[in-house]
Structure formats: C-alpha cells, structure tokens
Image (cartoon, rainbow, N blue to C red):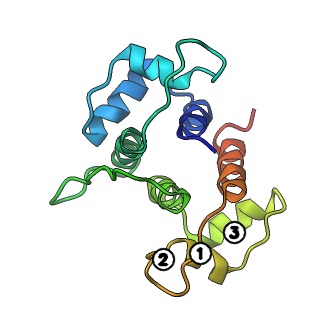
C-alpha cells in the first residue's frame, strides 16, 4: 500500500477539500501548495502524479491528530523520516481516539479476526520481542472499516 493510497483514502473517508488538506499539513508543520496536494492525490497513471514521501505523510498524520484531538502541551510532534505501517496505524488510532476493543470490533466487520495480544504487538516498539510488523492487508482493511464508520454512504 502506497502513501498516496493512504492519503487518498483518508481524504475520501473524511471528505476533506483541498483547503482542509492544506490546513492539515500546516498543522503538522509543513506548508504545501494546492498543486502538490493535487499531484499526490492523482492516480499513478496520471502524468502529473507525484509520490508522497514518508516524511510528508507524517506531517499530514500529525496534523490530523492535532486537528481531531487538539494541540498537545509541550514539544511539537516531529515528522518521522521513515514511516512503517505500524506507525501509520498508531497515528490513526490516536487521531481517531480509538480503543483496542473498538478496533478489534470494527476489524471483525470485515472478517479480520485478531486477538487483543496480536493488536497490541503492532503498537509495541520494534526492539521488543513481542513486536509484530503490520502487513498491508490489515492496514488496508482498517482504512476500509474507518471509511464505513465515518462515511457510511
């Protein structure tokens, strides 16, 4: 799953317009132009398509967290240079203020049945023995489920 797929999915799920997308990047700490956002949202076949780097997606996700949860006291969040599916999943969990039970419940709606222990392994630090790498299929299903939840039409 590409970063562009994730960005397109989140834009559709929350029905963000260009101005809102630009504002979310700004909240995360990056100034972007309408043309940049437009090119990131295009399909791969389009000649104007541009891939979005991990760091840029991290700015967007940080902005989404700030927009939905409010600004945290203290140090501003830093956009990571490299994102993994686990980190994206964690940022979405924080932005949507979801508890583990809620995630498990909604994943079950698309026949993704994992235990609470498996779910917690995705949120551990990579240095821990119990850490598990989140595969694209689970992230894709999670994005589909939040789309069903936040945009049921």
| Disc sitting over residue 7 in the figure | none
* Residue mark closest to the camera, 1 vs 3: 1
Q: Position of residue 153 (x, y in %)?
A: 75, 32
Residue name at image x 64 percent, y 64 percent: 103
Disc 1, disc 3: CB below 8 Å?
no
Task: Measuring from the top left, give residue 102's x and y in whole percent.
Answer: 64, 66
Dot 3 falls on a residue whose secondary structure is helix
Q: Earlier in the sequence, mark 2 or mark 3?
A: 3
Above or below for 34 versus 113: above
Mark carried by residue 132:
1
Extreme left residue here? 74
Eye-nearest disc, 1 or 2:
1
Image position, residue 63 (x, y; %):
35, 42
Check disc 3 and report the residue beneath it. 104
Compared with residue 153, is residue 82 higher up or lower down, i.e. above or below?
below
In this view, the residue farthest toward the bottom is: 129
- The image position of residue 68, as x and y in percent, is 41, 46
Identify whether 119 is placed above or below 14: below
* Whole-number angstrom distance, CA of label 1 to CA of label 3: 16 Å
Secondary structure under tag 1 reads loop
Name the N-terminal-most of marks 1 and 2. 2
Identify which residue is drawn at 39% across, 39% down: 60
Q: Nearer the viewer, residue 50 or 140?
A: 50
Q: Residues within 10 Å of mark 3 (few under 14, many from 20)?
A: some
Mark 1, other Cα within 10 Å: few <14 / some 14–19 / many ≥20: some
- Residue linked to disc 2: 124
In terms of sequence position, does the residue under pointer 1 or pointer 3 come before the other? 3
Q: Residue at x 63, y 22 (%)?
A: 43
> Dot 2 surroundings within 10 Å: few (below 14), some, or many (20 or more)?
some
């Amino acid at each position: 799953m590409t970063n562009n797929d994730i960005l397109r999915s989140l834009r559709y799920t929350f029905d963000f317009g260009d101005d809102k997308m630009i504002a979310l990047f700004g909240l995360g700490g990056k100034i972007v132009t309408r043309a940049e956002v437009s090119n990131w949202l295009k399909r791969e076949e389009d000649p104007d398509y541009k891939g979005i780097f991990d760091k840029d997606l991290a700015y967007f996700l940080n902005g989404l967290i700030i927009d939905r949860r409010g600004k945290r006291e203290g140090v501003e969040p830093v956009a990571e240079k490299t994102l993994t599916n686990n980190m994206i999943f964690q940022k979405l969990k924080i932005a949507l203020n979801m508890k583990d039970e809620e995630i498990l419940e909604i994943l079950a709606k698309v026949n993704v049945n994992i235990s609470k222990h498996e779910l917690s392994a995705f949120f551990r630090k990579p240095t821990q023995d119990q850490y598990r790498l989140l595969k694209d299929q689970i992230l894709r299903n999670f994005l589909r489920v939040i789309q069903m939840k936040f945009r049921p039409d």
